[in-house]
Amino acid sequence: MGKQPKFSIITITYNAAPVIEPTLQSVLSQTYANYEYLLIDGGSKDDTVAKAKASGIEFAHIVSEPDNGLYDAMNKGIALATGDYLCFLNAGDAFYAPDTLQTIANAATAEDELPDVLYGETAEVDEARNFVRMRRLQAPKQLTWRSFKSGMMVCHQAFYAKREIAPMYDLKYRLSGDVDWCIKVMKKAKKLVNVNATVVNYLQNGLSLQHHRASLKERFRIMSKHYGLLPTIGRHIWFVIRAVIKR
């Protein structure tokens, strides 16, 4: 068994008091102890930070100050992180089970050396924390940077990148910068491992869902940059046909 990896869990918040507690409790309940937890808050006006401080979690960092949007806050988290892997667990999202980090660590240490990317499946939940469905796009058995030609095949919160190969987020993107970031990580990655487990409960009210059309336009630009304009147009025609068929 190889080195036991350290996880840097990063939660980005802004006025997240109504949804933060399940996130905090899921971190607190983890059976695997080799992690640090960073809360990067955008200067909340509610009691988000107070709830975090009262949770009983030993934070590596709590930062609460105005920022230049979601990806600027994520960059602050990356800059402060010291773990082997980055894990972005947004406010309202939660680890799937108390042994989730242990499951991911086991998958990492089963390899000869720590993989560059670890990834798994995503369950979608509502605000009452009830299971709604598994995420429509299933994580592929073998993930490469070309996999995202077919859409974001792995949810950002179920994608664990080795910190040493992770770039900063491109701040020209406001809604779909995580797609660009994941592709950049995968282009650098030599070994990507599917942990063959559901790893996150994803709350169905994300920023990109609230601004769906703008998010899709931004995602189109990102995919065109990485995969070429004409192939991306062709893929999006197929996405439309697929959506109609599935109705």
Image: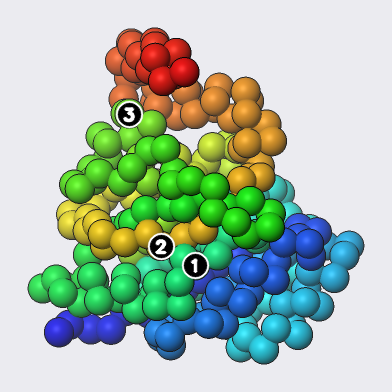
Q: Foreground mark, 3 or 1?
A: 1
Q: Is residue 226 above or below residue 205?
A: above
Read off the residue under disc 3. Answer: 150
Q: Is residue 225 above or below residue 141?
A: above
Q: Earlier in the sequence, mark 1 or mark 2?
A: 1
The answer to whether mark 2 and mark 3 are in CB contact below 8 A is: no
Read off the residue under disc 1. Answer: 95
Q: Secondary structure at mark 2?
A: strand
The answer to whether mark 1 and mark 2 are in CB contact below 8 A is: yes
Read off the residue under disc 2. Answer: 199
Q: Quadrant of residue 205?
A: top right
Nearest the eye: 50 or 85: 50
Residue 215 relative to residue 223: left or right: right
Q: Secondary structure at mark 1?
A: strand
The amino acid type, in three-letter code, at marker 2 is Val
Q: Earlier in the sequence, mark 3 or mark 1?
A: 1
- Residue count near mark 3 (Cα–Cα under 10 Å), binned few <14, some 14–19, many ≥20: some
Question: In percent of the image, x 26 and y 50: which residue is there?
Answer: 188
- Residue count near mark 2 (Cα–Cα under 10 Å), binned few <14, some 14–19, many ≥20: many
Q: Quadrant of residue 144?
A: top left
Residue 47 relative to residue 30: left or right: right
Q: Is residue 94 above or below residue 145?
A: below
Nearest the eye: 66 or 4: 4
Residue 118 placed where, x, y %? 30, 61
The amino acid type, in three-letter code, at marker 1 is Phe
State the quadrant of the N terminus. bottom left
Residue 48 placed where, x, y %? 79, 69
Residue 186 relative to residue 33: left or right: left
Residue 23 relative to residue 120: left or right: right
